[in-house]
Image (cartoon, rainbow, N blue to C red):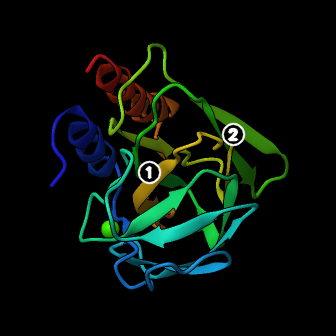
Amino acid sequence: MPNGSAVQAKNGFLSQLPGNSIEDFENSTEKDTSPLDLSFTGGAGTIKGTLTSKGSGTVANSSVDGVFPTSGKQFWATNSQFSIDFDAPVVAFGFFLSNIKTNPLILRLALVGGGTQDLSIATTVPAPDGTLAYFGLIHIDNPFNSATFIGATSTDGYGFDDLTIGVKQAETVPEPSTVLGIGMALGLAALFKDKRA
Ligand SMILES: [Ca+2]
């Protein structure tokens, strides 16, 4: 089981969601590749997704070269750009990312209202093989239906597991924008802490 500041960041992220649904890759077949059908299940309902990769990427069940699962045995291992298209608008997205090291990743969201938004997932100091980070974002007032990981070009790749989404609850009062900032800060703070190891 993962622990440390990445898990604290995950718990902080989840605590701000009224419900969440998770794809943990445990129901995928090892070595399955793009396009991969995803199913996020849990308190936010069942949301389907499709993972499309521009290059290599596979469901893995072995921990090699610093990538590893954070639940069960399986995770998505890749060194290529990939996208996840959701079949419903989502307002929150989080995930464990292993082996982030020094290559920056850009997470590009396709907004339901039009346009895209880029978020940088970058390290400030070199991190060793096997570094684990958790990244979570909450976008209550700006739903998105696609997320693309750009710049995943590390030669020994990245591991993604426990992809988590949240949807807007019909009866939920929109949250103040300051809450969004906290959600981002938690994920990023954990990211930077992890880098010191
Ligand atoms: Ca897993």
Q: x, y (%) of residue 150?
A: 70, 44
152 vs 63, left or right, is: right
The disc labelled 2 sits on which kind of residue?
Answer: Gly
Which residue bears the numbered disc 2?
151
Q: Is residue 131 depicted above or below 27 in this figure?
A: above
Q: Which corner quadrant of the figure contains ligand 1?
A: bottom left
**Residue 113 against residue 101 in the figure, above or below:** below
Q: Amino acid at mark 1?
A: Gly
Q: Residue at x 21, y 38 (%)?
A: 8
Say which element carries label 2: loop
Q: Position of residue 120 (x, y in %)?
A: 61, 30
Q: Which residue is mark 1?
A: 94
N-term-proximal mark, 2 vs 1: 1
Query: Depth-wise, is mark 2 or mark 1 nearer the camera?
Result: 2
* Residue visible at 27% across and 71% down in the picture: 73
Front position in the image: 118 or 61 = 61
Q: Is mark 2 within 8 Å of ligand 1?
A: no
Q: Residue at x 39, y 29 (%)?
A: 182
On the image, the x and y values in percent for residue 172 come to 43, 59
- Please indicate, yes or no, whether residue 66 appears anywhere in the rendered image: yes
